[in-house]
Amino acid sequence: SSFKRGASVPKHATSQARIRSLRRSSKMFEVLALLMPLTVMANENGLAKLPPMGWRSWNLYGADVNQKLIQSIMDGMVKKTRYGESLCDIGYCDVGLDDNWQNCQAGAGGNHYHDKDGNPVVNLERFPNLKAMTDYAHKLGLTAGFYGNNCICRDEHSSDRKFYEGDVKAFRKFGFDAWKLDGCGVQTDMQLWDDLIKASGKAVMVENCHWGSKVPYKPNATWCPWNFYRTSGDVRASYSSVMGNLGTVTQYAQQNLSTPGCWAYPDMLEVGCKHGPGGAGDPGLSLAETRSHFGAWVIVSSPLTLSHDVNNDTLTDIIWPIIANREVIAVSQTYAGFSGGPFKKSGDVVVLDQVNYAAMEKGMTEEQQKATGPTIAPSWQYLYKPLNYDGTRVAVLLMNSGDSRADLTLAFADIPGFACKTCNVRDIWNHRDLGAFTQSYVAKDVGSHDCAFLVITTAAEPSALMFA
């Protein structure tokens, strides 16, 4: 069970002012635990109790995918070449195929890749045997993800139930475990997908990839027929895009709509990716920006979906201390009543880009894309995530989006639900206890587009948070 989403406030506390007061209380999480009723998560498939972790092909490879490539990625996910550990040992154990597995010339009835009976047709030149591919994943101890309601050569005459049934039948035949359902075609009935999937066999991890704009894209207090859902347009490999997408999660967290089994998701990670399908919009991230990107996705409880070339050892060596940092991942894999979000920001803002990728939708003209901008962000902002229910341990991410280095001052009294005058501070990027501080802590000389990632505890609590 988990906290009920959305309008799950007890009848005697319906006042919004009362709710805000409770959230500011030093006993916030104890109060919520007592007052907010527990319920079974809306998607009762038992999956994604913590934010899912894995890999998917689009952000680096785009449409340039084939079975040999995906199976080589599977090999890379289980290689124990760094400190005797693999990516799967760390928690990234799902490998997801994205678009362009379909045969765009094989459709019927006005469709591109569905036949007249509703069955999807695979491009056998690219993927000669999808069942063999998923069997290979399972042999390695991995799960395998599929992709549906495709964008490349999207079908616009496939809304009849038989097409949903044909896709689910193929999904089961191919042996996949997870499914990313995009928003490009006309198969957008997420409740029908859920009904058919549940009626057809074992539980399936489902991503609603409707970009935070194509209905249905938002859960409510009692309805979430998927396991995680996109809150934005496609992320690009640029700091401006990362920050734009990050901002789209906040409203869902504030409404308690990002919870176990139903996580808000600002898209895949761009860690280690550049020059991908976004073209000029994919210049790549600096190491500092990579830390900020990964840390931000962690502290808002986003699913962590890698997309880099896991077989590029030079690249993986560079990003390994970030993506395999067990203390940071432990923050991701902890839930204590709130999924995480911003609590303080500067009064001044910086313009990061003239467009806003987070607000873009598929099919926009160039003029419409330009009209989404600009992307702006506070010059600095702080985000937090509680790590237990009694308000004695919290993770805090201090982000510097400004153009120059800065000292970032954190007043402990500003952290929601956290009561501590003298607190232990630990730097979890560097696995280092920084000491006990009274009333505040100053992160010195934080670089432009970089961050400090801290675990703050009361004096009676250990600061180190180990990954289990």
Image (tube, grey):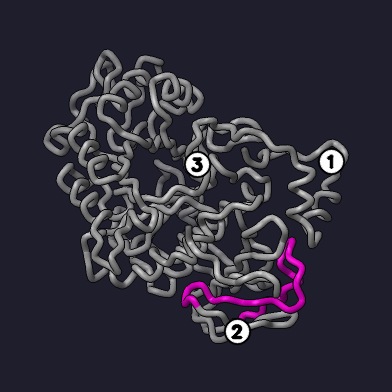
Measured from the top left, where is residue 117 in percent x and y?
27, 13
Q: Nearer the viewer, residue 308 or 325?
A: 325
Any mark on residue 130, and which?
none
Horizontal placement of 433 versus 166: left or right? right
Q: Look at the image and give the residue range highlighted in magenta.
A: 408-431
Q: Secondary structure at mark 3?
A: strand
Q: Secondary structure at mark 1?
A: loop
Query: Is 467 contained in the magenta span?
Result: no
Q: Nearer the viewer, residue 285 or 253?
A: 253
The residue tagged 2 is 407
For image coordinates 33% across by 66% down, the residue present is: 283
The residue tagged 3 is 229
Query: Is 416 contained in the magenta span?
Result: yes
Name the residue type under label 2: Asp
Measured from the top left, where is residue 220 in percent x and y?
63, 35
The residue tagged 1 is 14
Measured from the top left, where is residue 97 in percent x and y?
29, 42
Name the residue type under label 3: Tyr
